[in-house]
Amino acid sequence: MHELSMALAIFETVQKILRENECKKVAEIELDLGETTLINDTQFKLALETIFEDELPFKNCKIKINTIEAIFGCKKCGNIWKPNLSYRSPMISHLENLSCVHCMDTHFTFMICPSCNSNEIDIKSGDECILKMIKIMG
């Protein structure tokens, strides 16, 4: 479960920003979370809420999480597409039977281009975890 470690990293980042700006309260945060991060947004939000609940500067902080759609591109033919399970190589079927998060992190490594069947793939979007906005108060 890397949701908790990501939530702690966001918490520490926001704390640092509070200190640097000599502010006392966080009213709202907004995050962009890509589909290929394999971070469960519900668990991630719950982890943030749990961390925030006992911290006075974060009391009643609103948390907004935007899901960023995965877009892939082929280095060989230039095709751009939204991933679909039918575009995976046969090797991924082995990984689907494993519950290990480290194995599932390779899920998108085994994608193939639906146009030319190349495995030379770039993730164009959907791999981000960005702290997009922080609303802080005096």
Image (cartoon, helix red, strand yellow):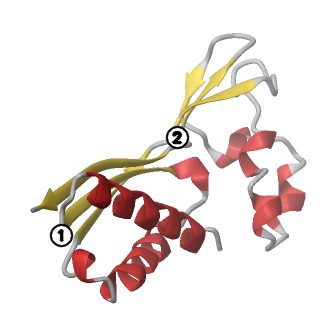
Is residue 37 or residue 133 the one in the foreground? 133
Crowding near the residue tagged with mark 2, few <14, some 14–19, many ≥20 C-alpha atoms within 10 Å: some
Q: Amino acid at mark 1?
A: Lys
Is residue 94 or residue 43 the one in the foreground? 43
Q: Which residue is mark 2?
A: 70
Report, in whole angstroms, how far the alpha carbon at label 1 lies from the one at label 2: 34 Å
Q: Nearer the viewer, mark 1 or mark 2?
A: 1
Image location of residue 25, percent across then percent down: 18, 69
Mark identifier at residue 25: 1
Image location of residue 21, percent across then percent down: 23, 52
Task: Determine the residue positioned at 81% across, 22% down.
Answer: 118
Image location of residue 68, percent across then percent down: 42, 45
Residue lying farthest to the top in this orientation: 77
The answer to whether 43 appears left or right of 97 in the picture is left
Image location of residue 47, percent across then percent down: 46, 78
Total numbered labels placed on residues in the image: 2
Task: Determine the residue positioned at 71% across, 38% down.
Answer: 87
Mark identifier at residue 131: none
Work out whether 14 lies above or below 56: above
First reached walking from the N terminus: tag 1 or tag 2: 1
Tag 1's secondary structure?
strand
Work out whether 83 lies above or below 7: above
Tag 2's secondary structure?
loop
**Which image quadrant: the N terminus?**
bottom right
The quadrant where residue 65 appears: bottom left
Residue lying farthest to the left in this orientation: 138
Q: Amino acid at mark 2?
A: Ala
